[in-house]
Amino acid sequence: MAAMMNIPKFANATEEADWWFQHREKVSEQFQLADKESLLGRGTVARLAGLTPATVRLDRADAQKAEAAARKRGLEYRAYLELLIHEALERESAA
């Protein structure tokens, strides 16, 4: 595979957005090459971002309530659950 792109440190989000826009063709080429060489992995970006995967089991009634509430808010089910957990943890740590 070709050498990885050197992604600089950015002073702010605008600078970062501009850089990614200016380099979008090169990023796309490298992504396609990595895909062709089977170098893409599930969860790679999440791992690099320091996110920790978790599995939560809900009973059917709670899952249905969460799905309905997510739809009502225009959110995906998983994003809604993450939001609920985050808010609960914030309340708990503030108490």
Image (cartoon, rainbow, N blue to C red):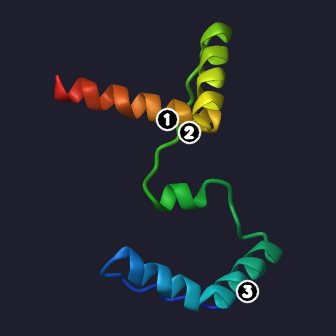
Is disc 3 placed on a helix, strand or loop?
Answer: helix
User: Percent x, y for residue 28?
Assistant: 71, 82
91 vs 44, left or right, is left
Q: CA distance from mark 1 to mark 2?
A: 5 Å
Element assignment for label 1:
helix
Residue at 54% over, 33% down: 80
- In the rendered structure, the answer to whether residue 31 lies left or right of residue 11 reads right
Question: Which residue in the structure is indicated by mark 1?
Answer: 82
Residue 62, above or below 93:
above
Q: Position of residue 86 (x, y in %)?
A: 39, 34
> In the rendered structure, are the residues bearing label 1 and label 2 in contact, judged by CB atoms less than 8 Å apart?
yes
Towards the viewer: 19 or 5: 19
Say left or right for 4 vs 89.
right
Residue hosting label 3: 29
Q: Position of residue 51 (x, y in %)?
A: 46, 49
Residue beneath the point at 56% across and 91% down: 22
- Mark 2: amino acid: Ala
How many C-alpha atoms fall within 10 Å of the one at disc 3: few (<14), some, or many (≥20)?
few
The answer to which of 18 and 51 lies nearer the viewer is: 18
Q: At 57% across and 85% down in the image, what residue appears?
A: 21
Disc 2: which residue: 79
Alpha-carbon span between mark 2 and mark 3 = 30 Å
Which quarter of the figure is the N terminus placed in? bottom right
Q: Amino acid at mark 3?
A: Glu
Which three-letter amino acid code belongs to the residue tagged 1? Glu
Mark 2 / mark 3, whichever is N-terminal: 3
Q: Nearer the viewer, residue 6 or 92?
A: 92
Mark 2, secondary structure of its residue = helix
